[in-house]
Image: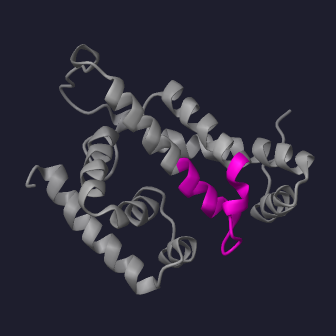
Amino acid sequence: MQATAATPDEIDDLAHRAQGGDRDALDALLGAIRPRTLNVCRGVLPYSSDAEDACQEALLSVATKIGSWHRRGRFTTWLHVVAVNSARTTYRKLKNQATPSDVLPLERPDPRTTSVIAGTRLDLLDAMETIEGTSPQLVEPLLLRDVYGLAYDEIATLLDLPLGTVKAQIHTGRKLARALLRGDA
């Protein structure tokens, strides 16, 4: 028998209680958010085992840094950022550890691992790494909007930025990403 997923209000309540030091609430929160966290990580990383590793890292971050959620928005919105950052960190580690023999050329992108924006999710992650090197403030808003579909106002609240700034960062990030993905940059 499958348990019903916790509602955003229930998750917020658990997070509030966990911030107050309630260990049972923290345990319940981690159990409730694990499927959502894993889905976010799977959205970035094409291989299940890598996504599982990133999910575990994200849950550890939630458990140890729950105090950094400032309650300006939904806990689940804050969780998206934690999970995306964990998946990107996992990708960076894997990329740095890879040897040339680990990389197999693909004749065409696998539709199971293909992003709407890029030829593959890995293309997109490489583009985000390049953008982060020159304009790091553009990456997070762009991923939250175009990959995870968060609303502009949610992103503005989450990042504590004016709405116009968020829209401008996303617009600029999209232009840079398009050029990188086409090979123009």
130 lies left or right of 79: left
Residue 20 belongs to the span the image colors magenta: no
Find residue 56 and report its horizontal and vertical position in percent: 63, 35
Frontmost residue, 118 versus 12:
12
Frontmost residue, 100 versus 13:
100
Residue at (89%, 46%) from the top-left corner? 23
Find residue 149 and report its horizontal and vertical position in percent: 48, 63
- In the image, the segment drawn in magenta is 64-83
Magenta region, main secondary structure: helix
Q: Is residue 137 above or below residue 40?
A: below
Tell me the quarter of the image containing the C terminus: bottom left
Q: Is residue 73 above or below residue 20?
A: below
Residue at (56%, 48%) from the top-left corner? 83
Q: Quadrant of residue 1?
A: top right
170 lies left or right of 70: left
Residue 70 belongs to the span the image colors magenta: yes
Find residue 120 and report its horizontal and vertical position in percent: 29, 40
Find residue 10 and report its horizontal and vertical position in percent: 83, 60
Q: Is residue 14 above or below residue 153?
A: above
Q: Quadrant of residue 2?
A: top right
Q: Quadrant of residue 101?
A: top left
Residue at (51%, 66%) from the top-left corner? 150
Residue at (25%, 43%) from the top-left corner? 119
